[in-house]
Amino acid sequence: MSTRIRLVAFAVGILLIGTACTPQEIALYLESTEPTSDVLSPDELLRLRMCESTDNYRAISPSGTYRGAYQFDQTTWDDVAGRHFPWLTGIDPIDVDPWWQDAMTRALWSERGRQPWPVCGKKV
């Protein structure tokens, strides 16, 4: 079995054990995130997240404008969601499960690289 298949199987197992997700929800996640799943590694996401929010998926900037682990503003969140994950449009990033915040970050990175994160993107 290839390393990639083992990693996917491991991730699915963790999702099943660690969440109350149904098999259909897990299939939706895997299918919808597959095009950008290799954009940033888990270590790269962690470095970006640590810089942006000290690994806090419910972080809110002092102004309240930037939200979640990767400090999205609502306009950018909705724009990216509209192209990749339409069911997340209009939802506050802090109210979205961590794996969806990670997926949204990978999707935005796939389109614009580190540009949306001018300081923290350099740490990736």
Image (tube, grey):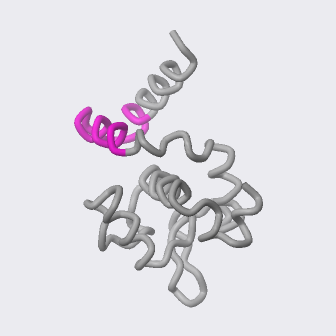
The image quarter containing residue 34 is top left
Q: Horizontal placement of 23 versus 92: left or right?
A: left
- Residue appearing at x 49%, y 25% in the figure: 10
Q: In this picture, which residue range is highlighted in magenta?
A: 15-32
Q: Horizontal placement of 84 versus 76: left or right?
A: left
Please, is residue 75 above or below residue 30 in the view? below
Residue 83 x, y percent position in the rendering: 34, 61
Report the magenta stretch's main SS. Answer: helix
Please, is residue 115 above or below residue 24 in the view? below
Question: Was residue 51 drawn as part of the magenta stretch in this picture?
Answer: no
- Residue appearing at x 45%, y 58% in the figure: 104
The image quarter containing residue 55 is bottom right
Residue furthest front as drawn? 111
Residue 25 x, y percent position in the rendering: 27, 41
Total marks placed: 0
Front one among 119 and 94: 119
Q: Horizontal placement of 82 versus 72: left or right?
A: left
Residue 29 x, y percent position in the rendering: 34, 42
Front one among 41 and 9: 41
Question: Was residue 19 drawn as part of the magenta stretch in this picture?
Answer: yes
Q: Quadrant of the C terminus?
A: bottom right
Q: Horizontal placement of 96 versus 50: left or right?
A: left
- Residue appearing at x 60%, y 47% in the figure: 40
Front one among 87 and 23: 87
Residue furthest bottom as drawn? 63
- Residue appearing at x 51%, y 9% in the figure: 1
Residue furthest top as drawn? 1
Residue 86 x, y percent position in the rendering: 27, 61
Residue furthest right as drawn? 123
